[in-house]
Amino acid sequence: MGYRFNLNWMGIVLVPFFAGGIGLADENQCEIPDVGVLSVGQFKPKFSLTHYWQRAENGVDEKHPSRFAGLYDLDLYYLFDAEADDDKTGDYLLLGISAQTSFGHGIERKVGTFYDLNDGAKGDNDLFIDKLFIEFTSLDRLLTFNIGKLDMIDYFDHSAVANEYKTQFFAYPLVQNQVIPFPSKGLGIRGLFEPNRFWYVQAAIADAQAERRETGFRTTFHDEDYYFSVLEAGIRPRFGDLEGNYRITGWYDPQDKEYLDGSGRHKRDDLGVGLSLDQQVATKTTLFFRYGWADERVNEIEDFVSFGCEFKGLIEGRDRDIIAVGYANGLRSPDNLGPLDERELDLIELYYRIQINDHLHISPNVQFVMDPGNRSNESPATVFGLRCRYTF
């Protein structure tokens, strides 16, 4: 059984949050990555609405070719304790809670593609808690730990400009590595060792059979002992004022997988590797690149490559606007191809994010999907899209 909340009850709870927060904040303050500055004893809420519209042209199913989807996210943070520190960078103990509700489905069936063309289309779901965790640091933030119901995607295979479907690219293969079988949100532990800004190492273990709408206890403790593991190392070089991030990620999945060739054989202890690089080449221009490999005998995609570029503030007077283009190519396993199936999966995506103000942005988007239906000798499908996101 998953977490459930009554929307009326949630409305009563949210009133004091948005009226100024719950809890008596003490004078000890701490700056926490991706959260901001918090005082001990203070709750900090973040709420967002993200709506998507997409329409496919020249897909395999041209009847009712449009799709509308949306997400409503609430993130709450509570700072239990923090070391007094003049620059607000001392060790801390933080509680994080995330709740989400969604509606609408993706447009993949209309196009006929293996790729997820809108990672924000999560289906029709009532409000549920999808993350609940404790984060704490030690030894002046040399070590950071997260324990609870986690999303591994929040920590691994990142990119500065190709990482988030709510603010960057729509399609999953342009925000994550297509070959890494990250489990759904569930119980796990993550540890980060970061001796300085230049390099880090992190690792995690999580329930490989997790269901994001459940607490995680059933699959973690009362099902098969399958635990997904991931290890990542990264460096962050600077070339003058130009920043870069270079990461290598290895993963291990112990789940039983059937061979794709129909032989009936099975394999456990699957392994794979991925790279994720991003580098500023000018103040307003950043390049990105990903590569991934997985065993073709039990994985649909054997080799994966994506790359592209982000341009920020190219239009005079629009310094916060972003234009980006990306390309993704996946090489399918030959063991699962029909005589007419196309082995290479190609996708191009272009978006322009218009920043209206601090809280609202609108992003027109277009995608070109080669070989719709995953069949050779087909004309490309074109998917037009629009995203509207409001945060407060």
Image (cartoon, grey):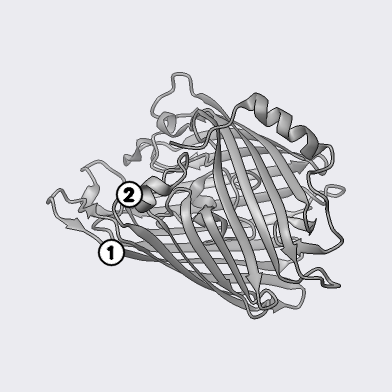
Circle 1 sits on which residue? 269
**Residue pictured at 67% horizontal, 31% vertical:** 10
**Residue pictured at 40% horizontal, 31% vertical:** 109
For mark 2, give the secondary structure.
loop
| Residue 8: % across, % down | 66, 24
Badge count: 2
**Toward the viewer: 343 or 83?**
83
| Residue 360: % across, % down | 77, 38
**Residue pictured at 54% horizontal, 59% vertical:** 147
Amino acid at dot 1:
Asp
**Toward the viewer: 88 or 336?**
88
- Tell me the tag on residue 130: none
**Residue pictured at 87% horizontal, 48% vertical:** 317
* Label 1 Cα neighbours within 10 Å, binned few <14 / some 14-19 / many ≥20: few
Question: Which tag, 2 or 1, sits closer to the chain's start?
Answer: 2
| Residue 215: % across, % down | 47, 44
| Residue 141: % across, % down | 67, 74
Q: Is residue 30 above or below residue 318?
A: below
Circle 2 sits on which residue? 222
Q: Quadrant of residue 20?
A: top right
**Toward the viewer: 40 or 38?**
40
Is residue 261 rendered to the left or right of residue 25? left
Q: Which one is in front in this view, the residue at disc 2 or the one at disc 1?
A: 2
**Toward the viewer: 12 or 239?**
12
The residue sitting at the left extreme is 263
For mark 1, give the secondary structure.
loop
The C terminus appears in which quarter of the rendering? Answer: top right
Amino acid at dot 2:
His
